[in-house]
Amino acid sequence: MSLTISAKAKKITWLLAMVYFASYLMRKNFSVMLAAITASGFDPVALGVVGSAMTISYGAGQIVNGILGDKIKPQYMLTCGLFLAAACNFAMSFCTTVTLMAVVWFVNGFAHAMLWPPIVRLMAMHMNDTEYGYAAVRISAASSIATIVLYLLSPVLLKVMDWNKVILCIGFAGVAIAVAWVLLNPRLFQKEGASLPTADGAEEAAAPADAKKNVPLPAMVWLPIVLIFLGIVLQGALRDGVGDWMPTYMAQAFELDPENAIITGVVPAIFSIISFTAFDLLHRKLLKNEVTCAAVIFVGSTVCAGLLLMLNLLGVSGWGAAILSALLIGVLVACMHGINLMLITVVPKRFIKSGKVSTFSGLLNAGTYVGAAVALPLFPALAENFDWNATIIAWAVIAALGAIVCFAVVPLWTKFRKEYSDNPEV
């Protein structure tokens, strides 16, 4: 049975997807080119600090902007975030030291933290449950599409210009998308919480729980939230830590030149696009508890890390080993995007009765970047002081811990949904 999505919900989806696409262009460009930047003379461990600066400010900014996102008109936050991010990309193109890079990218992280919480709030306000799921998959996929564009376009541009000029070009692209957002959003968000026409022309409430806002949360919710946050931290360590350092790993393990190593990074992005649809289907049709779904996905990522380690220990080399390694890493990172979809996009929707969707969206999303801030300098340090096998073992351990944490949350989250979010009497 096909999903019934109103025309206006589809327009909102694609507009917000465009915003999220721009966000990833201006946020991931530096990490995508890490191999090339390292080859230009910068120390890889020092560059990890630049990535950590962004993830720290992005994570902290998620909490701040998540709270503000329930109080300030979300359209204003998205506009400010997009233009500030573009300004940071312009500034980054002129940085010549790691210190300056870290400062600029710290500000850039906060700029991007102004985007996700209001996006989630707009989805919850202007869409019903079915439309929310439709939008979540497509907006999330926009991030992977942006990553693919970066991984495919960056090597081409790096042949004719330096990495900092590539970032400058991306800054201009960000400004263009920000201007398009400013021109288009008033037509779709004329009045917050207004009813939207459904596909058959009938009026339907924008948010399913509009009549029951600010219902106090039960005390029992905080333990599962803490555990879910921990699971998100582990997910963030793998999603960004593995994804960002994959080209460097491929370059060092298989002696690829920086441009070819960068291209291998497109594999996780392609797999991630597939994963959004696949894991959404798994959630809707089979594992309807999103925390259970996340736990199962963590198990799959543990298997991927184990297979990658086995491949290395067997000493397999050549293009066949390189391709198989890229595929295993691609599946591992795609699994992290699936967990992100479950725990950061679906979970906040359960708090719509409390009127704190943006707050919980920002709080939970912050966990991703706590994990990333630790992993970005940790993984290359492990590789440098030991070898890449030690790093891959760390990936497997982190994935296994994520599965354990999520399985522990399942009964608590099931009780919360039954007694609060799914209870029509609350």
Image (cartoon, grey):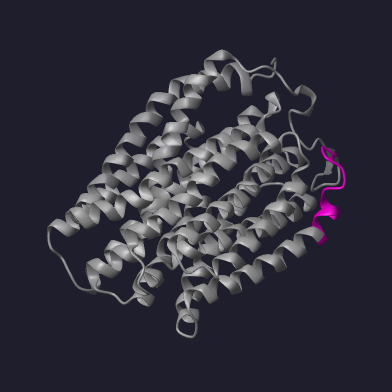
Count of numbered marks: 0
Foreground residue among 11 and 370: 370
Residue situated furthest bottom in the rendering: 160
- The residue lying at 60 percent from left, 61 percent from top is 88
Q: Quadrant of the C terminus?
A: top right
Foreground residue among 82 and 105: 105
Q: Is residue 187 magenta?
A: yes
Left or right side of 387 for 197: right
- The residue lying at 70 percent from left, 59 percent from top is 83
**Residue 261 appears in the figure:** yes
Foreground residue among 337 and 261: 261
Q: Position of residue 281 (x, y in %)?
A: 52, 45
Left or right side of 364 for 115: right
Above or below for 340 versus 15 = above
Q: Position of residue 286 (x, y in %)?
A: 48, 37
Q: Position of residue 287 (x, y in %)?
A: 47, 35
Above or below for 298 versus 275 = above
Foreground residue among 154 and 414: 154
Q: Which segment is the magenta one? A: 183-195
Residue 66 position by quadrant: top right
Q: Position of residue 408 (x, y in %)?
A: 38, 24
**Residue 1 appears in the figure:** no
- The residue lying at 27 percent from left, 40 percent from top is 397
Left or right side of 210 for 289: left
Above or below for 166 versus 133 = below
Residue 209 position by quadrant: top right
Q: Is residue 109 magenta?
A: no
